[in-house]
Amino acid sequence: MCFDVQVRRVQLLSGNFQRITFAGSCLAEFGVQGQTHDLRIKVVVPSVSDDGQQIPLPEFDCSDTSWYRNWLQLDAAVRGSMRTYTVRAARCSGAEPEIDVDFVLHFDEEGKGGPASSWAAAAQPGDRVSIIGPNAAHCVTAESYGGIEWRPGMARHILLAGDETAVPAITAILESLPADITGHALLEVPAAADELPVSTESSVKVTWLPRGGRPHGELLDAAVRSAVVLPGWASVEGAPVPPRPQIDDVNVDETILWDTPQRLTAAAVQATPNPHTPAGALPFYAWIAGEAAVVRGLRRYLVTEAGIDRKQVAFMGYWRSGRAEA
Ligand SMILES: Cc1cc2nc3c(=O)[nH]c(=O)nc-3n(C[C@H](O)[C@H](O)[C@H](O)COP(=O)(O)OP(=O)(O)OC[C@H]3O[C@@H](n4cnc5c(N)ncnc54)[C@H](O)[C@@H]3O)c2cc1C
């Protein structure tokens, strides 16, 4: 469903995170039943003309179910840019429904950002965007909406790992965890000043990894490897090595890396080491998101080296270095 909303508040959380609170009476219908976890939405931000002026978004009839088809048919120069974001928090049941989205303010060496980060950096109360997200009335449970990938099943020990684009999702997930959950949350961010407050009742150990100019993903990769160690056989010289599970090595330049348990094909499930164990029945679950090449490296490590059952891990390329979101 499409929601026509306005910016209510803008809050600079740190050097690289800008929280934007969106409001609009239509948001009374927004949401899922239960926690939002890593709920993703699409945000349509206005295009910018050659002379740097925002082109107001076309008026949409959000109640029209063919809204998206109509939007695609508009001139690309004026229809705005659609990007994917996470709902950091939703407060839609009160008289003034609103949602928070935490935008990473990313800019290259020349100071150029993508349409969404540039829009977010300059956003002012009253600015208008369109959001595509779930209609609570049609999402009987959180799981019935395809925009939530967090599905730990019966796991009580977890790994959450991601870069700054995954911080909104990981911090929202941490807030929802009960006290008996253990594990690690590893968050790589541009700088120490980007370490945001985290609230969780769980026993998950939260570790911030400020990059400080190191290559993207270097710290995250090392931290995941030390949090999930290789099985014993892999470190004993001369020990018989059991056959390693095969995974298709996704070409992240050509396709989106999105390998989450509920989207595995029947064939892929059969190819996992434990084909008869239903997804969600094992005690460990991992959720990994961030730059696609970094996530691909972690996927290779966790599945083929550490031997983690693919049905127990969600791997999500949230963005690809050097590529605008298609
Ligand atoms: C499910 C999901 C949830 C997401 N949640 C969030 C969220 O809550 N907050 C958030 O900030 N992002 C989030 N992202 C990532 C966001 O969609 C991308 O970063 C997106 O590319 C930003 O759009 P843009 O218009 O700013 O840049 P684009 O036009 O898409 O890209 C322009 C250039 O910027 C580069 N780029 C894009 N993102 C980054 C980055 N983070 N750091 C450095 N360079 C970058 C691209 O490689 C490209 O070269 C999420 C993505 C997914 C798939």
Image: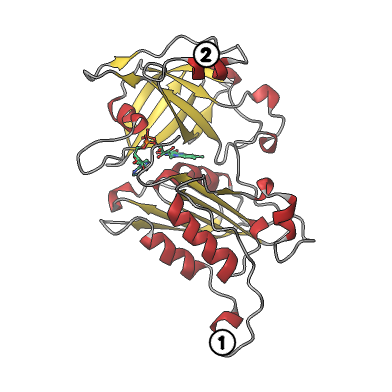
Q: Quadrant of the N terminus?
A: top right
Give, as a three-letter code, the residue at label 2: Ser
Residue 12's spot in the image, x, y percent? 30, 34
Residue 285's spot in the image, x, y percent? 62, 57
Residue 62's spot in the image, x, y percent? 55, 13
Q: Is residue 107 visible?
A: yes
Q: Mark 1 falls on what kind of element?
A: loop
The residue indicated by pointer 2 is 25
Residue 53's spot in the image, x, y percent? 25, 16
Give, as a three-letter code, the residue at label 1: Val
Q: Mark 2 falls on what kind of element?
A: helix
Residue name at image x 58 percent, y 90 percent: 238
Q: Is residue 230 above or below residue 311?
A: below
Q: Is residue 305 above or below residue 233?
A: above
From this viewpoint, which residue is outermost toward the bottom?
A: 238
Q: Would the CB of label 1 be found within 8 Å of ligand 1?
A: no
From this viewpoint, which residue is outermost toward the right?
A: 276
Q: Which mark is residue 236?
A: 1
- Tell me: 164 left or right of 281: left
